Image (cartoon, rainbow, N blue to C red):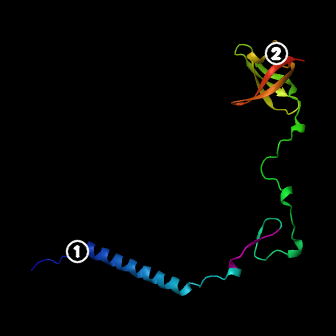
């Protein structure tokens, strides 16, 4: 007589697979019983109120506002040539390193810091000096050019 080909490990694996199949079949049956038919269009609709909040009730047609297409502005405002600001600004030197040849000016109008290089100076400057300058955009931000003491 020969030994049975089924070992204890094989029997356990087969039991485990059979249990998984049974669980899967039960879950499928449960889903089938609990499944609802699709919702109606009215149940799926969502509305926005005047504050931008999602609501299930449609908006009141009496509160409807109309806008003219000409009044809508999308993106940056158009540049109007008459609105040019004065190209010459004033400010105070907040930092200047003579050895390295650069520093920063705080613009008195916009309070932003503007880079200054020694090549753009018409005369020597030091920290806390009042200066006038023009702003030019460089690769890393605004640069001061034509810098003069006030």
In the picture shown, does residue 91 fall above or below 17?
above
Question: Dividing the image into 4 quarters, which one contains the N terminus?
Answer: bottom left
Crowd class of label 1 (few under 14; some 14 to 19; many from 20; radius 10 Å)? few
Residue at (87%, 38%) from the top-left corner?
81
Crowd class of label 2 (few under 14; some 14 to 19; many from 20; radius 10 Å)? some
Residue 129 x %, y %: 86, 18
Compared across the picture, whether 55 is left or right of 27 comes to right
> Considering depth in this image, is 34 or 108 the residue closer to the camera?
108
Magenta region includes residue 119: no
In the picture shown, does residue 94 fall above or below 39?
above
Residue 89 x %, y %: 87, 26
* Occupied quadrant, residue 93: top right
Residue at (79%, 65%) from the top-left corner?
52
Circle count: 2
In the picture shown, does residue 86 fall above or below 25?
above
Name the residue at the bottom extreme: 33
Residue at (79%, 29%) from the top-left corner?
113
Q: To which residue does mark 2 refer?
A: 126
> Residue 7 shows which numbered tag?
1
Residue at (84%, 23%) from the top-left corner?
133
> Considering depth in this image, is 68 or 43 the residue closer to the camera?
68
Q: Which residues are magenta?
A: 43-49
């Amino acid at each position: 007589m020969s030994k049975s080909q089924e070992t204890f490990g094989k029997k356990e694996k087969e039991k485990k697979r059979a249990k998984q199949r049974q669980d899967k079949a039960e879950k499928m049956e449960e889903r089938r019983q609990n499944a609802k038919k699709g919702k109606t269009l009215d149940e799926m609709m969502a509305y926005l109120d005047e504050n931008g909040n999602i609501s299930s009730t449609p908006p009141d047609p009496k509160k409807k506002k109309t806008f003219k297409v000409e009044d809508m502005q999308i993106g940056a405002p158009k540049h109007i040539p008459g609105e040019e600001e004065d190209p010459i600004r004033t400010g105070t030197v907040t930092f200047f390193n003579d050895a390295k040849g650069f520093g920063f000016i705080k613009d008195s109008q916009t309070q932003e810091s503007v880079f200054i290089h020694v090549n753009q100076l018409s005369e020597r400057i030091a920290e806390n000096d009042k200066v006038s300058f023009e702003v030019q955009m460089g690769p890393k931000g605004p640069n001061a050019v034509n810098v003069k003491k006030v």
